């Protein structure tokens, strides 16, 4: 397994995901979205795995303007808006190769073992 967890230290779900993998002694790489965001290729890969770019938007994010912008952006331009406003992505984003989850999903992660 090649697990990557994308999140921020302030996200409680990202911390829970980190703890979940540590408790099972599963090695992972943690990427802080504030320091190094998702690349265009990573965003496309995750979006394809979770059912589209819309599934990545956290409607409860603190930056309400960016959320509204993303919700009212045509799908052809949504990728660029999300790359520029990664603070509105649901967290954690957990990748295992081509598989990915958004949010705290331990039931799915169990199937990866």
Image (cartoon, rainbow, N blue to C red):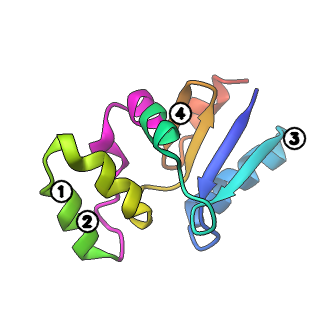
For disc 2, the neighbor class at 10 Å (few under 14, some 14 to 19, many from 20) is many
**Closest to the observer, 19 or 27:** 27
Determine the CA span between mark 4 and mark 1.
22 Å
Q: Residue at x 19, y 40 (%)?
A: 76
For disc 1, the neighbor class at 10 Å (few under 14, some 14 to 19, many from 20) is some
Q: Residue at x 46, y 43 (%)?
A: 40
Residue position marked by numbered label 1 in the rendering:
71
Q: Is residue 1 above or below residue 59?
A: above
Where, quadrant-wise, is the C terminus in this rendering? top right
Q: The magenta stretch spans which residues?
A: 46-62
Q: Indicate which label's residue lies in the foreground, 3 or 1.
A: 1
Label 4: which secondary element: strand
Label 3: which secondary element: loop
Residue position marked by numbered label 3 in the rendering:
25
Q: Is residue 66 above or below residue 27?
A: below
**Closest to the observer, 26 or 51:** 51
Dots 2, 3 in contact, CB < 8 A: no
**In x, y percent, where is residue 78?**
25, 48
Determine the CA span between mark 2 and mark 3.
36 Å
Upstream in sequence: badge 2 or badge 3: 3
């Amino acid at each position: 397994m090649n697990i990557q967890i994308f999140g921020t230290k302030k996200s409680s779900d990202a911390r829970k995901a980190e703890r979940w993998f540590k408790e099972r002694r599963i090695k992972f790489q943690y990427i802080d979205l504030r320091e190094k965001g998702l690349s265009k290729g990573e965003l496309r890969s995750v979006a394809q795995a979770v059912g589209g770019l819309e599934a990545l938007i956290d409607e409860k994010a603190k930056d309400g303007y960016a959320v509204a912008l993303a919700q009212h952006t045509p799908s052809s331009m949504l990728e660029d808006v999300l790359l520029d406003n990664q603070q509105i992505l649901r967290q954690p984003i957990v990748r295992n190769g081509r598989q990915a989850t958004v949010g705290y999903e331990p039931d799915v992660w169990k199937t990866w073992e």
